[in-house]
Image: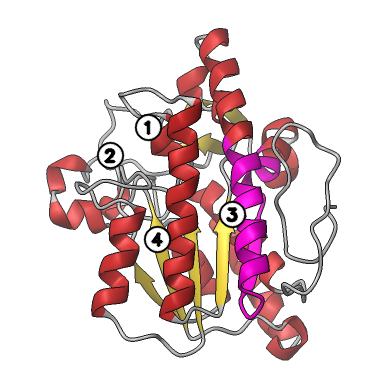
Amino acid sequence: MTQKRMFCLVLAVFFIAPISVFGASFDTLVVFGDSLSDNGNLYAADPLSVPSAYYWEGRVSNGPVWVEYLAGDLLNCALVDNAYAGAETSGEVPPGLLQQVNLYAATADLPHNALFVVWIGANDILSESGVTEESLADSISNIGTALQKLADFGAEDILILNLPNMGSLPLSLDSQTTGLFLKAASISFNSSLSDTVDHFAGDNPGIAVYKLDIYSLFERILANPASFGFTNVTDVLLDPAKPYNFDNTEGYVFWDDIHPTTEAHVEIAEQAYELLNSGSDNSGGYGDDGDDDGGCFISTVSDFN
């Protein structure tokens, strides 16, 4: 999606219908995660880790990441971003999810009317030590622990995202074996995550839990890119021979072999905003979208569409 299209969407939201119709109104967005949500934290700590010649202002993309669009353009709220590029669900350097949540809960006051966001897990699967059934279980357990910590801290609204099909990343396209393995790992991770989030929501009925199905979103984008304004879903846009060139007029989905372009981040933000405005809460059951490849994830009430 182009920046112009995004601007037009925002104008439509504010001029066609009052915000009360949609329902999503938060004062603060508090984010935990990895490079998919990091708005420059790792770069601030170590500029050499995210070279600005190839990554826009320390974002691991060619522009802002999705939480910046969601907080700034759509929800019009403050952004408190605790995500670090390279983060796993645990670990010290960079701070993993557990460390991010524990540090935040120990040093911050509970913001008024805050939406807490958790998106993590890709680096656990891509870990140099390799991914196993046991390591996946540990990753999911860490997420469950972090969610409960947020509940104990006083969170009332939590948005959690699952993983895309990592077998469809440019990183995986040169090897069918690697692609199939990463797809299977993504599906297994998402299934376990969905069960864990369901259990958490059941144990914490006072918390509105929003589940965003990134797997299905990216499958739709890759299957029909033109409908989302994209033309290239397999190649990477980043060119080492062209530093400080962040233009994406050609409509690429991927900036490098793992990370999406800022235009793809816009799509994620829009999908999140649509979910938040769907009127769902945690009073109902979970549906199934009929996609056995990675679903079990969209919202706390509505059946999958």
Q: Which residue is mark 2?
A: 54
Task: Report the mark closest to the observer, 4 or 3.
Answer: 4
- Residue type at mark 2 is Tyr
Q: Secondary structure at mark 3?
A: helix
Do the residues under discs 3 and 2 have CB atoms within 8 angstroms? no
Q: Earlier in the sequence, mark 1 or mark 4?
A: 4
Q: How many angstroms separate mark 1 from mark 4 (CA)? A: 26 Å
* Rendered view: 183 above or below 266: above
Do the residues under discs 1 and 3 have CB atoms within 8 angstroms? no
Q: How many angstroms separate mark 2 from mark 4 (CA)? A: 24 Å
Q: Is residue 265 left or right of residue 105?
A: right
Q: Earlier in the sequence, mark 2 or mark 1?
A: 2
Please give the range of residues in magenta. Answer: 189-218
Do the residues under discs 2 and 1 have CB atoms within 8 angstroms? yes
Which disc number belongs to residue 278?
Answer: none
Q: How many angstroms separate mark 1 from mark 3 (CA)? A: 20 Å
Q: Is residue 101 left or right of residue 138?
A: left
Say if residue 107 shows up in the picture. Answer: yes
Q: Which residue is mark 4?
A: 32
Q: Main secondary structure of the magenta part?
A: helix
Q: Earlier in the sequence, mark 2 or mark 4?
A: 4
Q: Secondary structure at mark 1?
A: loop
Mark 2 neighbour class, 10 Å CA radius: few under 14, some 14 to 19, many 20 or more: many
